[in-house]
């Protein structure tokens, strides 16, 4: 694994104008990519150009602008699908990964209320398996499913080092397991989970598998089918794309059987006053006006990622992540959450500073121009499991450099003295 050369990093960073900004008198050091990645200029320019000069109703109208907009929208879906190793008609556009997961969860609630289709209908005592490492977006929707259907949440534990093992998932599976929902990478720990092995185990138990791929989507070549899941959720804004758009990938069988949750125009073949017939996926899950400019912008962001090199970005972030982990680990009275021994990690480190609240840590870092995440990172149960209420997080992107890491580690080393801790 190797980092980008200084010359390569300069070229990449030049495409992200936000990195030229100053914060509190210091050049911006952006270490919050796990929350939202910055956007390359070319993608924003093309999205804006499309919005200003080519906007028209998609899949409606016979005029030239409508036909061109529809073609551009379809091309964007096709490119995004190819980027994640999917076929276009298996990609459902949503507002975010959170909505993607909720779309599946709502399908279970609806099917359970009416008793069909069978694979999506839950009864009292059926079980939903999640892990201790889940983001709230892959926990709370399943809590609501359980509340509404009488199903039971079962939690696969992580180790003291934060690892989710196949054995841990196996320990909570039973003949009543109907859903297994897991993340590919913890947004707190950065540890890559054995999702394919977990999915195989879940399928052997007869469960449907839902994967939250948000934190892996931008840190390597995302291949949704390789997870062996039924559904995979991911978001554009963590992949150098715009906010307001995400996607749900589903297998052909899962999308065909999944009941419609949201309804309206553009997703039907026949409508009468007492019934309607729906188009096949993805249209049957995308009622109303589509996310046109967002899709255009997302596809262009991914073209930029491809131009830099997906594998090269992954290697850069992994190598730089090792430097980051080692630097933080060397600071006295700073505890990293999650082990670094014998695990595959993305470029992300969360930590707690003895005697200093994470929000104070974050404010001090901000005073030095460093953007870091503080709080429980929408993963309260995991923080409780690891014995802290909250933490501070550094996370890397393609534009991160050794200088960024050095500046952040040096500032972090000064935190306790600044707040009068010895």
Image (cartoon, helix red, strand yellow):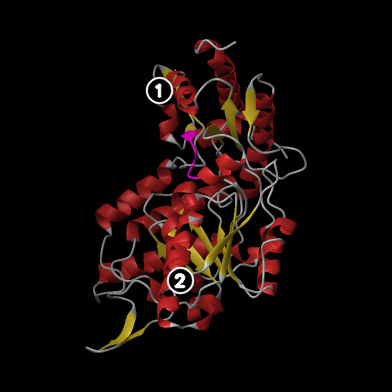
Residue 156 rendering spot, x and y as whole percentages: 64, 56
Q: Nearer the viewer, residue 141 or 95?
A: 141
Range of residues picked out in magenta: 374-379
Image height check: is 197 above or below 318? below
Q: Is residue 375 magenta?
A: yes
Query: Label 2 belongs to which residue?
Result: 149
Image height check: is 386 above or below 27? below
The numbered dot on residue 22 is 1
Chief SS of the magenta region: loop
> Residue at horizontal 31%, vertical 49%?
48
Q: Residues within 10 Å of mark 2 (few under 14, many from 20)?
A: many
> Residue at horizontal 51%, vertical 82%?
118
Q: In this view, does 278 lie to the left or right of 361?
A: left
Q: What element carries label 2?
A: helix
Q: What distance separates the C-alpha of mark 2 from that of mark 1? A: 51 Å
> Residue at horizontal 56%, vertical 49%?
215
> Residue at horizontal 49%, vertical 80%?
256
Image height check: is 361 above or below 48? above
Quadrant of residue 347 in the image?
top right
User: Marks 1 and 2: in contact by CB < 8 Å?
Assistant: no
Q: Does the magenta stretch include residue 47?
A: no
Residue at the limit of the structure toward the left, as seen here: 273
């Amino acid at each position: 694994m190797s980092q980008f050369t200084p010359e390569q990093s300069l070229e990449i960073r030049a495409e992200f104008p936000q990195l030229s900004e100053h914060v509190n008198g210091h050049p911006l050091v952006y270490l919050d990519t796990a929350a939202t990645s910055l956007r390359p200029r070319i993608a924003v320019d093309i999205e804006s150009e499309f919005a200003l000069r080519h906007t028209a109703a998609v899949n409606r109208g016979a005029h030239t602008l409508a036909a061109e907009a529809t073609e551009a929208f379809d091309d964007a879906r096709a490119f995004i699908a190819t980027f994640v190793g999917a076929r276009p008609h298996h990609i459902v556009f949503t507002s975010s990964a959170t909505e993607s997961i909720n779309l599946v969860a709502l399908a279970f609630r609806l099917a359970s209320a009416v008793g069909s289709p069978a694979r999506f209908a839950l009864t009292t005592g059926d079980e939903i398996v999640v892990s201790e490492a889940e983001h709230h977006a892959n926990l709370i929707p399943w809590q609501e499913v359980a509340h509404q259907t009488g199903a039971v949440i079962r939690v696969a534990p992580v180790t003291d080092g934060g690892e989710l093992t196949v054995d841990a998932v196996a320990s909570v599976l039973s003949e009543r397991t109907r859903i297994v929902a897991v993340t590919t990478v913890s947004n707190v720990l950065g540890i890559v989970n054995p999702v394919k092995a977990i999915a195989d185990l879940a399928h052997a138990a007869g469960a449907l598998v839902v994967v939250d791929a948000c934190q892996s989507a931008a840190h390597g070549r995302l291949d949704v089918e390789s997870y062996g899941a039924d559904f995979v959720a991911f978001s554009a804004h963590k992949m150098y794309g715009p906010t307001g758009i995400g996607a749900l990938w589903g297998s052909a069988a899962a999308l065909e059987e999944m009941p419609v949750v949201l309804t309206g125009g553009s997703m039907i073949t026949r409508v009468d006053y007492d019934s309607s017939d729906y188009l096949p996926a993805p249209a049957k899950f995308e009622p109303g006006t589509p996310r046109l400019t967002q899709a255009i912008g997302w596809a262009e962001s991914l073209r930029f990622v491809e131009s830099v090199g997906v594998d090269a970005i992954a290697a850069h972030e992994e190598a730089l992540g090792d430097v980051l982990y080692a630097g933080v680990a060397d600071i006295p009275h700073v505890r990293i959450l999650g082990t670094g021994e014998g695990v595959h990690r993305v470029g992300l480190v969360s930590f707690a500073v003895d005697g200093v609240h994470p929000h104070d840590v974050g404010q001090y870092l901000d005073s030095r121009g460093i953007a870091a995440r503080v709080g429980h990172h929408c993963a309260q149960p995991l923080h409780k499991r690891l014995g802290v209420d909250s933490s501070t997080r550094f996370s890397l992107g393609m534009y991160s450099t050794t200088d960024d890491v050095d500046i952040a580690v040096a500032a972090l080393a000064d935190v306790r003295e600044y707040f009068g801790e010895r």
